[in-house]
Image (spheres, rainbow, N blue to C red):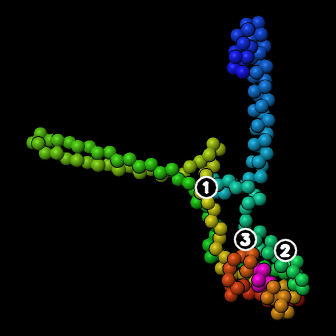
Amino acid sequence: MFEKIKKIFTNKEKRIENLVSFLVILVITLIIINKILGSNKEKEENYKNETGVTLATQTSSESVTSDNLEKRLETILSKISGVGKVSVLITYSESSSLVPIYNVSSSVSTVEETDTSGGTRKTETENNEKGVVTDSSSNVITEKMTMPVIEGVVITAQGASDSNIKSNIISAAEAATGIATHKIQVFEMGDE
């Protein structure tokens, strides 16, 4: 294959013509690759710390917020037979956080000096550097995202006066949130 390419470029009559054709094909290929990769960037959310530095990039389909979890739980609970209209409140003890990947480098230098009276002195200097790893777009690469810690769930539902329905609501909330049943409180929804 390389011999064919070499023959194309060594033919002096068609050299410029072949070079232009090659460049056009290369540009078209780069544009296609850019369009394919660029379509994924439209769906990304950037997470920033207090100073405005981007901490991580995550697609919106992966993001889970407290409001999102509450809405999803309301949707699933309202589909349980006899529950009716539902409202959910989830409390958290901590917020979500991103753990970036760090590039750590350390070096030790030793200097040994001898003075005129024959005494020696040895000095060691240790240098440690820790920097956040970024991608080509200067976005920080994260090791993991820790989700907020759920402390409790309060649910009001129209059908909560029935003990079987209340038990089903508690079981579903326990399965969805992973917290113990004593941290889930269910109440009958009052008139609005």
Mark 3 and mark 2: Cα distance apart in space: 14 Å
Q: Is residue 25 left or right of residue 137?
A: right
Q: Which kind of residue does numbered mark 3 sit on?
A: Ser
Q: Are marks 3 and 1 in contact (CB under 8 Å)?
A: no
- Front tag of 3 and 2: 2
Q: Are marks 3 and 2 in contact (CB under 8 Å)?
A: no
The quadrant the N terminus occupies is top right
Is residue 50 visible to us here?
Answer: no
Main secondary structure found in the magenta portion: helix
- Report which quarter residue 65 is drawn in: bottom right
The correct choice, above or below, for 40 with respect to 63 in the image is: above
Which residues lie in the magenta part? 169-173
Q: Residue at x 79, y 75 (%)?
A: 73
In the picture of the structure, the residue carrying the numbered disc 1 is: 142
The kind of secondary structure element at disc 2 is helix
Q: Which kind of residue does numbered mark 2 sit on?
A: Thr
Q: x, y (%) of residue 174? A: 73, 80
Q: Which kind of residue does numbered mark 1 sit on?
A: Thr
